[in-house]
Amino acid sequence: MALAASCYGWRHTEGWSKDIAAESTEGLRLAARALELNKFDATILWMCAVAVWILELDTQRALELAYRSLDANPNSAIALTIGGRIEVLSGNYATGRQLLERALRLSPRDPRAWLMTTGMGAASFAEDRFEEGVSWARRALAQNPHCAPAIRLLAINLAQLGQLADAAKAIADNLRIEPGLTITGFRSRRMFVDERYWQKVCQALRLAGLPE
């Protein structure tokens, strides 16, 4: 149930949901039931954190679940990753970076390492470390060449560096994966993101050529 709940969350962020309202309701129902059955399991806790963060837009509750997951298993790379991503995209860049760096040290060859590296790229972008952001995005793409979030991350960091031709190429690659993507449509899938961070992303996406 927790896995299904988290999948409903990830589906929404990628624009794959067929009925957002129905899937959100079902995802949150599954998360609540999973926690009723076992509120101490580290894996259940981080999976439910994903669902609550994305589907319910309850960042504080999501962070509580993520940190409870780490209390249950302090060496869980994926729990560190989820906690780190939530912190970064909520505006707590330094805290998020620390969690993600720890995740990378614990599991440098993790099969889900693109979640770590895109999180690091987002932190770098937020902190105006754009060259570092480009490096993290390319590292994610080396593992998962069709990772749309990594492609967008590459585009926004390149745009902030003034490398607009390369940023536009990255956006074109993204549009081949997601035809019809717009800034407005993208925002509707990222309502859990801190407004200050989003405004910076939005500006960079415009520079890179993503339609409104």
Image: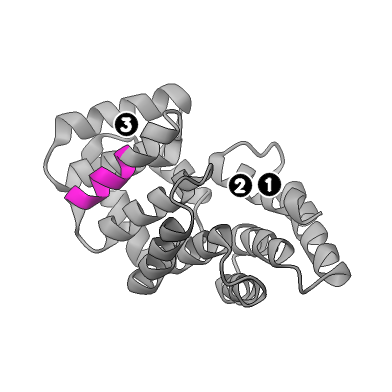
Q: Is residue 169 left or right of residue 164?
A: right
Rounded to the nearest angstrom, the CA distance separating label 2 from label 1 is 5 Å
Q: Which residues are magenta?
A: 131-138
- Residue that badge 3 annotates: 171
Quadrant in which residue 66 is drawn: bottom right
- Residue that badge 1 annotates: 7
Mark 3 or 2, closer to the camera:
2
Residue 160 in the image: state x and y as whole percent: 17, 48
Question: Is 159 within the magenta?
Answer: no
Rounded to the nearest angstrom, the CA distance separating label 3 from label 1 is 25 Å
Three-letter residue code for mark 2: Trp
- Nearest the viewer among 147 and 100 is 100
Residue at the left extreme of this rendering = 162
Residue at the right extreme of this rendering = 37
Tag 1, which secondary structure?
helix
Q: Is residue 51 above or below residue 23?
A: below
Quadrant in which residue 11 is drawn: top right
Identify the main secondary structure in magenta: helix
Three-letter residue code for mark 3: Ile
Residue 65 in the image: state x and y as whole percent: 65, 72
